[in-house]
Image: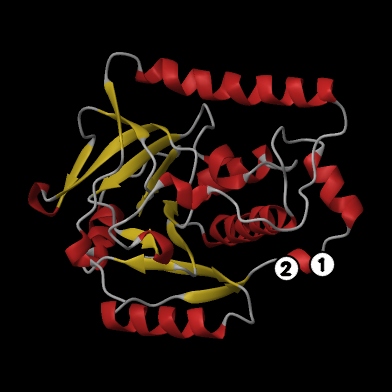
């Protein structure tokens, strides 16, 4: 399976780590130069903030554009691709899992989430697929507000996401709550961001450090309407989860990760 790693050109240390990690796993890849937040004007940032209910930082918008750039490449390639952010640490079992995903039929509306994040998801009680003799499973994810550092999509999902993101949205939260998307969480997770690899993980890690004042929607009514639209989409996903799901963190086997 082809692998795209989203990375800023100046992140030489992360790029070196990824090159070493992927070589150790025997996987080929390409770097995709990330969109730079510094290239955004205040007017562009405010325009993006006007179509998202929460606070918006320039790096959020840059991340959004970077993933869209990756989706364009997936759509052009015409085959499933693993998209990584450059701080993703990968499990030793990832090559075998990717091989089994490639061998399995992949419905046009399916995306695989390979990432662990230390925040409860809403996951199906029963697995949809099993890999490696049942040692790894894929189960439907109905709610995941954070995390887009390691996921597999095919060209159909890439094209649909490009259509759905013609206006800005906080990309990880927006991605997993498309009503048409069938997201599948891989367990144990096959990737984790470096900051979450320690034993003391906490949802506090998602709190943003003090920095430049974020941009916000212009007008309270606009913010309320945008929030309502977002919650309606999340609500549709939760209705699908009724009576057949559980709220918990994804499973992870930390012994499979090395830095």
Q: Disc 2 on helix, strand or loop?
A: loop
Residue 105 visible within the image: no
- Determine contact: label 1, label 2, CB under 8 Å: yes
- Residue at mark 1: 39
- Disc 1, SS: helix
- Which corner quadrant of the image does residue 59 belong to? bottom right
Please determine whether, in this image, residue 126 is positioned above or below residue 79: above
Query: Where is residue 178 drawn, in percent x and y?
Result: 54, 32
Which residue does the numbered mark 2 point to in the structure image? Answer: 36
Taking the image as shown, residue 23 lies to the left or right of residue 178, namely: left
Q: Residue at x 34, y 40 (%)?
A: 184
**Residue in the foreground of this view, choosing between 143 and 129:** 143
Q: How many other residues sit within 10 Å of disc 2, few (<14), some (14-19) or many (≥20)?
A: some
Q: Residue at image x 31%, y 62%?
A: 198
Q: At 57% across and 55% down in the image, what residue appears?
A: 75
Q: Quadrant of residue 94?
A: bottom left
Q: CA distance from mark 1 to mark 2?
A: 6 Å
């Amino acid at each position: 399976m082809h692998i795209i790693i989203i990375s800023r050109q100046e992140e030489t240390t992360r790029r070196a780590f990824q090159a070493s990690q992927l070589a150790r796993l025997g996987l080929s890849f390409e770097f995709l130069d990330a969109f730079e937040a510094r290239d955004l004007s205040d007017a562009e940032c405010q325009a993006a903030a006007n179509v998202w209910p929460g606070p918006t930082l320039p790096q959020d918008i840059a991340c959004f554009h970077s993933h869209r750039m990756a989706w364009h490449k997936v759509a052009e390639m015409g085959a499933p691709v693993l998209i990584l952010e450059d701080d993703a640490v990968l499990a030793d079992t990832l090559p075998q899992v990717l091989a089994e995903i490639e061998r399995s039929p992949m419905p046009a509306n399916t995306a695989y989430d390979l990432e662990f994040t230390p925040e409860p998801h809403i996951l199906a009680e029963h697995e949809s697929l099993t890999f490696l003799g049942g040692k790894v499973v894929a189960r439907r994810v109905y709610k995941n507000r954070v995390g887009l550092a390691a996921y597999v999509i095919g060209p159909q999902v890439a094209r649909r996401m490009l259509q759905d993101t013609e206006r800005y949205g906080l990309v990880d939260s927006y991605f997993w709550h498309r009503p048409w998307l069938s997201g599948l969480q891989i367990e144990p997770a096959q990737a984790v961001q470096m900051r979450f690899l320690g034993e003391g993980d906490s949802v506090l890690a998602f709190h943003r450090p003090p920095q430049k004042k974020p941009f916000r929607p212009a007008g309270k009514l606009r913010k309320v309407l945008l929030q309502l639209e977002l919650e309606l989409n999340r609500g549709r996903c939760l209705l699908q989860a009724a009576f057949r799901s559980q709220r918990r963190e994804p499973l992870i086997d930390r012994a499979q990760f090395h830095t």
